[in-house]
Image (cartoon, helix red, strand yellow):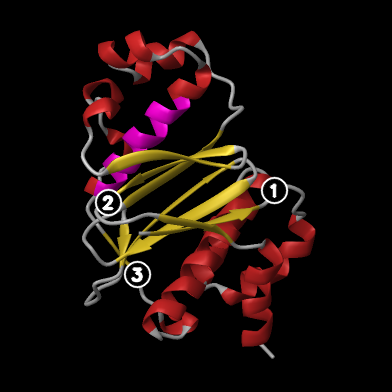
Amino acid sequence: MDIIVVKTDGAVWAELSGFLGCLDSTRRAAINRKANDSDKINSLVSRLLLLSEIKRRTGIPERKIKLSLGSFGKPFLKNSALQFSLSHTRGAVCAAFGEDGEIGIDIERRDRRVNERMYARALCGEEREKARSDEDFIRFWVKKEAFLKRLGVGITRDLRGVNSLELPDTNALEFGGFFVGASGKGDINVAELLLNELLDRFILLNN
């Protein structure tokens, strides 16, 4: 599984909004409906990352990539062995790609603020016993989300019914100021792609 992280701290929506033209009208409208610039940036960068990596891995041009949705909204590419998963948090977007079966990914900041209500809502009994810090909570959280995304159901399930300490092929990795949850078979490779490098792919595409 290849995991790519793009950090978006410091990005300015006014400087990125022109890249909406690289997306279809439905996706552009969805991004423009986002409540704030941070959400717009993450949604745009997520889509650009997904499209450019699908093209790089399959040869399908960005404008010809057609994604389908599973019953719980998980996107997939028909007639392809390529599997992928997306996640974002404040300051970063990540995507995972692989061909060894379904995969799931989640990313959260290591310094995310956690309150007691979140512990009660998200952790099973064994996890609560072993959680010694908010960072432990976040590790458990990203593993749960990644595993449920791998199944294609997301967080529609009660998270307390999922014990992150027993999940197969599921890990929490440290990457800079973030924890990345990854669920799927095979080796895991994590790399950072600079935002400007991602944007350059689309500048070259349109020249």
Q: Earlier in the sequence, mark 1 or mark 3?
A: 1
Residue 67 has which mark? 3
Residue nearest the observer in this picture, 156 or 96:
96
Q: Dot 2: few (<14), some (14–19), or many (≥20) neighbours within 10 Å?
A: many
Give the distance between the C-alpha atoms of the residues marked 3 and 2, in whole angstroms.
Answer: 21 Å
Residue type marked 2: Gly
Give the distance between the C-alpha atoms of the residues marked 1 and 3, in whole angstroms.
Answer: 25 Å
Q: Nearer the viewer, mark 2 or mark 1?
A: 2
Q: Which residues are magenta?
A: 138-150
Residue at the location (43% across, 29% down)?
Answer: 139
What residue would you read off at disc 2? 184
Residue 37 has which mark? 1
Residue at the location (62% across, 78% down)?
Answer: 201
Q: Element at badge 2?
A: loop
Residue nearest the observer in this picture, 175 or 70:
175
Viewer can see residue 152:
no
Residue type marked 1: Asp
Q: Which percent across, then down, holds residue 11?
A: 74, 54
Q: Earlier in the sequence, mark 2 or mark 1?
A: 1
